[in-house]
Image: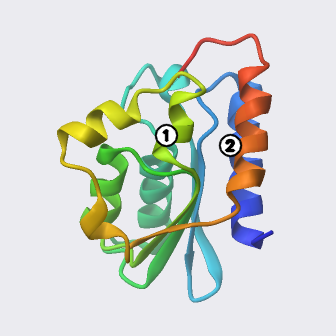
Amino acid sequence: MNEYMKLAIEEARSGILAGDGGPFGSIIVKDGKIVGRGHNRVLKKHNATCHGEVEAIGDAGSNLGTHDLSGCEIYTTGEPCPMCLCACMWANIDKVYYGATIEDNERIGFRDNKFNDLMGGREKLRDYLEECDRDACLELFDEYNSMDKENY
């Protein structure tokens, strides 16, 4: 398993165990060093935009002292929703590695695919997005599904 995806899964797990939100964790790497991390905190912060990728982008920007994350890669447990995908591009992140797919998100009660379809899909971004360690992320999703929790 990719070491950064393993850390993204651990980040997501810490969030779901704390009741912060869904099973989405992200790690941002630049030049082989972790510069940002985050997990879904939608429930904790009562803010629908506090997805794992957005939280990690904020953390990386603070740690690096810049809003420009050129030269960075992000590892995230779920294929980014349209909001997070745009945030990654807006931050100039070079590459997105994701575990579970947009379609996989539906099986745990999320509606990312609905918004993805409204935005016209992501076929033009296939060089930007790369699947990584899907099975390990699906195990995390199964763990989340088995919990007694508020969905988000």
The amino acid type found where label 2 is placed reads Ala
Residue 108 x/y as whole percent: 60, 26
SS for callout 2: helix
- Give the mark, 2 or 1, whose residue is nearer the N terminus: 2
Q: Residue at x 68, y 22 (%)?
A: 19
Q: Is residue 128 left or right of residue 151?
A: left
The amino acid type found where label 1 is placed reads Glu
Residue in the foreground of this view, choosing between 101 and 3: 101
Answer yes or no: is residue 141 visible.
Answer: yes
| 63 up-or-down from 31: above or below | above
The number of callouts visible is: 2
Residue 12 - label:
2
Residue in the foreground of this view, choosing between 131 and 85: 131
Residue 83 x/y as whole percent: 30, 45
* Closer to viewer: mark 2 or mark 1: 1
Residue picked out by circle 1: 103
